[in-house]
Structures are given as C-alpha cells and as structure tokens.
Amino acid sequence: MSGGQDPGLVAPNFNSATMLNPTPLGPPSSFSGPAVSPTPIGGDPTRLSQRMDNAGTAADRQLGAAPANNACATCPVQVRLEHRSQYTAMRRYSEQEWVPAARFIFLVGKDHSDADRKLSVRVAEPAGASATWEVTPVGGQSGTVATRTGTGNRFDYTPAVTQAQRPITGSRTPNLPVQYRIKATITHNGRTQEIVETVVQDERDIIRQEYVDFRTWRTGFTLHVPYRNRIREPSRPQMRGNYALVVDSAMTELLTATEAAYGGPITVSSGWRNPRRNIAAGSKVPNSNHQHGGAVDMQPATAHSPAGPTRRGEYLRLYNAARSVTARIVLLERMSSALYPSSAAVPSPTAKAPDGDHDGIPDAALQGGNNIQTTFDNATHVHIDRAPPDESEDD
C-alpha cells in the first residue's frame, strides 16, 4: 500500500463511549459481528463490568482477606513440630535441644539408672498452640507406648521394649530402625489443622540401640553405648559388621601402625563386629573388643598358601610387627582359639638353635611342648586389640 491513507479504513476513537456499545451491524468502517455488551456500573460505561466485579469478589473470598498485619484469616494453619530426647539436649550432638523430625536422634529402653528413656514432641508453630496427640509405634521392633494420647502444647511419651521385640541372638543382617508415627491435631484461632510425622532412628542410632539391648538383656555385657562420633565410614570394607558404618575406637589406628611396621599391605579378616555379628561369628566373649571397634584380625598376603617356610615366615613377621605397636594384647590365633601365649616373643635362631628352612623360627623350638613352627602353620590370623574407651554418658 502506497500513497495516502486508505479512505476505506477509519481509525477507532478510543475515547468514545460508542466503543463500549457496538452495534451488531453497521457501516463498513465500523465494528461488525456479534458482541456482548458489558453492563455499566452506576451508569458509567468506562468502569469494569459488574460481571468482572463479581469475579474479583469471588476470588477474594477464595484467597482470603489479608488484615493489616498480613495474617491470612482464611488460610490453613501453618504448623511445625519439634522433637526432643536426652541426646538432642547434649551439645556435642545438637546445637538445639528441640529439633525437626529429620534431625531427631533417640534411643529407647532402659538407661543406666534402669529408667525408660523419655521422648518429647511439641508444637513449635503456631507458638503456644495446643494439640491433641497420638503416638503409634511402627513395627514390632519399636515396642509399645503405654500412654499414646494426650493434649497440650507438649507431649511426652515413653516407649517400652521387650527382649522378644529386641532380639540379642546372633545375626549377620542389620536391625530395623525404631520409629514412631506422631499425629497432632491443632486448633488455633478457631481453625483446625492435622499434621502427621514419623520419627525414625538413623543408622548411628540403630547401631547404638543394639548396645542398649545387649546391656539390658545379655548377661555379662558391660560395654558402653558408643558415642555417635565413634560411628563412621570404615577405612576398609572388610572392617564392617552388619551395617554400612562401623564403630571405630582404635582398629584403624592399630591396623595402620601394624602395616607400617610390617612394611606392606595386610589383609583384614575381621574388624568391627556389632554385638549380634559377634555372636554369629562364634565368639563366646560377652565384651569382645571387636564390639567397640578396638580389635583387628589380620593376615599376611601368604595366608592362604600351603603350610611351609614361606607362610610361617610371613606370619612371624606380621606377629612381630603387631607386637611393636602399642596395644593391650597380641595373639596368634586359629579361629577363636589362641595358639601362642599373648604377646610373647618367639625365640630367634642361634648357632645352637638353627633355622634350617629360613622361616625365622628355630627348627626345634618348643612352646608348651608344641613345636612353634607347627603352631605358626596352624594360624589363621594375628589378633591385636585395645581396651574399650571409658565413655558412659550415653548409657
């Protein structure tokens, strides 16, 4: 299109009231076609239609009226719960005494004073709000709660567990976590809101709970409940018991020092054993140092070679390396039986006690009437350990 304006086109007048009341039919230069005429408000066609006004009012009712303090009078109640145990109250574990469910740490059952451990939950938001509470154990391993319901801003509940619910038999599989479903019905400012949370032991507390169980029911078991910071990623997969994490009070330190003295890599045949794993491994010792991560059973690279000078020589070298490390005890063992006096030195070859096969042991050397070379032939590992730490605060 060139030249002047097309005389067939007429620019609309946006200030004209006629724009709000088009006719269905008109001259070629005006709007044509069907249209819905809006209803003027108060006789003023420049305002929004009544229909639009009604829609806005309906939206206001749905979204809620906002008072001057920005509190929504019709919005759902914003609810937040917090949880407490004797362990969240310890500063070494938690900066806050009351924590959300995701950060809750807890144990159940009897403590060192023979009292059942108490757990607590409260309404943190709205502040000061009251709730009707209901606590339900999840799974048989979680025991029972005698008083499961209550009212108030805070609710204390005391789980109880039995030996049937918390077995102390041998096992090579992990225990299930203790967990509780908590339902809170909160009424605040005339409105009611329900919230449900489940508190679940993490792996550190699953492990710690096993020690609580054994302290409660296994005769002679006196090892302390391990601190959470003693439970960590293993330095080697062979260090594990039934869990991904391990209790490690000294075993990595003992292994590292022994390897340095040995001068080469060492195979770990057993590291940490949780109490149930310790029984499954055949141990009859209630307080085995394996259970607090203070013991390691080690083998030289030649451990599976046929009996003979090479195998004996490597076992002797490993045994002497372990003896050079600060430890409570070093044992040459076959399975769970000691073959040689604890931490005792092995006699060295001399002109009068020759070592014809060059294994480092005099050929005719005896200990307790047994040939020492034969004793080393029968060994399955070298054991090294330290005493458990005296850490009883979590019992």
Image (cartoon, rainbow, N blue to C red):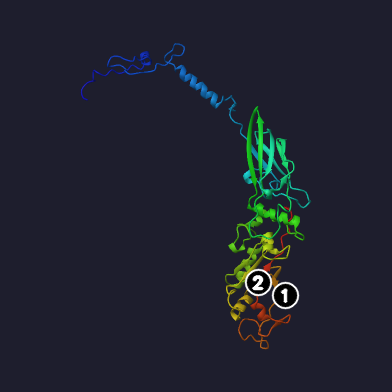
* Disc 1 secondary structure class: loop
Residue 188 in sight from this viewpoint: yes
Instruction: Residue type at mark 1: give it.
Output: Pro
Residue 144 rendering spot, x and y as whole percentages:
72, 46
Q: Quadrant of residue 247?
A: bottom right
Image x and y of residue 74, in percent: 59, 27
Residue in the picture at 30% in, 18% down: 11
Circle 1: is it few (<14), some (14-19), or many (20+) Cα within 10 Å? some
User: Quadrant of the rendered structure where residue 321 is?
Assistant: bottom right
Q: Is residue 301 left or right of residue 23?
A: right
- Provide residue 194's location: percent of width, then percent of height: 63, 35
Q: Nearer the viewer, residue 376 or 359?
A: 376
The amino acid type of the residue labelled 2 equals Val
User: Could you give the CA–CA distance between mark 1 and mark 2, rounded to whole angstroms?
Assistant: 12 Å
Q: Quadrant of the N terminus?
A: top left
The residue beneath circle 1 is 341
Q: Residue drawn 38% across and 15% down?
A: 20
Please determine whether, in this image, residue 175 is positioned above or below residue 25. below
Indicate left or right for 227 with 64 as reference.
Answer: right
**Secondary element at image label 2:** strand
Q: Position of residue 171 (x, y in %)?
A: 66, 60
Residue bearing mark 2: 382
Towards the viewer: 73 or 131? 131
Between residue 168 and residue 351, name the one nearer to us: 168
- Residue 100 visible (yes or no): no
**Dot placed on the residue nearer the N-terminal end, 1 or 2:** 1
- Which picture quadrant has residue 16? top left
